[in-house]
Amino acid sequence: MTIQVDDAGWGDPVGGVFLGVFRVDTNEYVVKEIEVVHFQEPNFDNKTFLARGLELVLEAFNCLGVTLDEPIQVCRGVVLDGVREGLNAKGYEVIPTKIEGQLQELVEANFVESLRQMGIRDIPRVSGKERFFRQLEWIQDDLEHRERYAKTGWKNWPTKLRNWRPKWRRKHRASLKPPIIIKLGGSVISDKTQRSTPRIETIQQLISEIVAIESHPVVVIHGGGSFGHFLAKDYQLRKGGRSQEKKIGVTKTASEMTRLGHLIHGAFLKTGRPAVPIRSSSIIVAIDGRISHMDLQALREFLRQRFIPILSGDVVADTVRGFTIVSGDQIAMYLARLLHSKQVVFATDVDGLYSADPKEHPDAKRIDLITPDTLDVIFNEIAVGASSEAADVTEGMRGKLDEIFKGLPDDCEVLITDIRQPGTLEKIIHGRPVPATHLRQHS
């Protein structure tokens, strides 16, 4: 079997350098990061990144069980000089080469995602001038606090790059007010006990409240509900696969999600408010079940023109699994980070998360605030005396909240509430209290 080793980030001013190790025959993949401190003084002059790179590649080899009889193709880049020399010394068959294809895409995606996690907007996946200067611009926006993320060991950092100033970019780039993101739960817009059964009246109620918002741009994301979940479960699509049967399952699911999307788009059409569907599978690529890239150029342009973009949970391409299901929850929180949203609303058929099902237990208490510190306590309280069915629901809600907190920015708040009542969304946007469960990173 053949092992490939490639890097990403060596020519980028922000962040460390990612190293990807890939077994070609089985698509096994491990990624490691040479931390940015190795590209700062005095480490950069001492070239500590060479020894650190070898150490990380050997860790990846251990994870994959790489043996001495497997040929090792290593990219010719300078940052991998220590890897090539070290592997040769240990008896591996090292073949310096230019790495292209799947490994290159994987490791570049990991590096770009790390930049997005820092808060850098619109980062191209392909390295070049646009990506380079976008990072410099981000540093200059808050040099005092962000310089620590830069490769300050570069010779031209103090003399040129540190004092770089963006010119035409800020002047000509149209500003975009952070949108409010609204996630319509699949169980709210459809009857999840019956295949492909929409709740037409509920959809129309929800859309009528959304289109009343004029003060902020809006992005709508909806779940799959009974249009997507039955098929996804039947074919085990979240796990991915490459068989013909699985691919037929993807095709059927995509068709059903298109039907649901038409219903929601049709509800917008009746209101006269411009809205446009953007198919999630056409702008998202995942790595092992997590979003690695989302192309937002079209979405941003539609927002600037005051359209309401409509996305959904969907089956998307996955560079490890072949394809996977990316939930509307994951998409909502990913967009919240990239679009710097201050509010994300999860629209449900109850006004928050309760200690028990309020439809069956009138004395159930609404939980007003949840933070990562209180999450375990809250779910322990809910679980006391729960039936097996209730426990299943609770476990599902725990997964939803874990997903939310995984992507929740410090300056953003998530509300779980019922927005069907007239004026509820308007109150949320203007900071007036509504019955809801609030999710924040801090109390």
Image (cartoon, grey):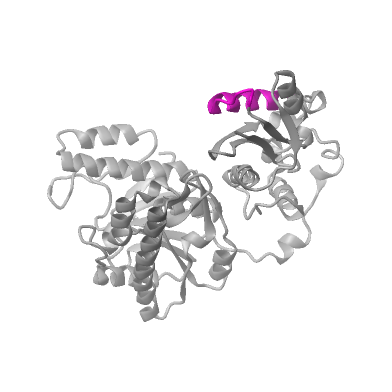
Number of labels in the image equals: 0
- Give whichever of 211, 326 is nearer the camera: 326
Measured from the top left, where is residue 369 in percent x and y? 33, 43
Magenta highlight range: 51-69
Q: Quick one: which residue is furthest to the top in this view?
A: 90
Q: Residue at x 27, y 57 (%)?
A: 187
Let me know if residue 388 appears in the view: yes
Side (left or right) of 191 relative to 324: left
Let me know if residue 434 appears in the view: no
Magenta residues: mostly which secondary structure?
helix
- Magenta span has 64? yes
- Figure quadrant of the N terminus: top right
Side (left or right) of 216 relative to 231: right
- Give whichever of 107, 1 is nearer the camera: 1
- Give whichever of 69, 409 is nearer the camera: 69
- Give whichever of 8, 24 is nearer the camera: 24
Measured from the top left, where is residue 285 in percent x and y? 53, 53
Location of residue 192 (image quadrant) = bottom left
Q: Residue at x 42, y 48 (%)?
A: 240
- Figure quadrant of the C terminus: top left
- Magenta span has 301? no
Side (left or right) of 89 relative to 102: right
Location of residue 169 (image quadrant) = bottom right
Q: Residue at x 69, y 27 (%)?
A: 53
Measured from the top left, where is residue 424 in percent x and y? 32, 63
Measured from the top left, where is residue 67 in percent x and y? 60, 24
Side (left or right) of 278 relative to 185: right
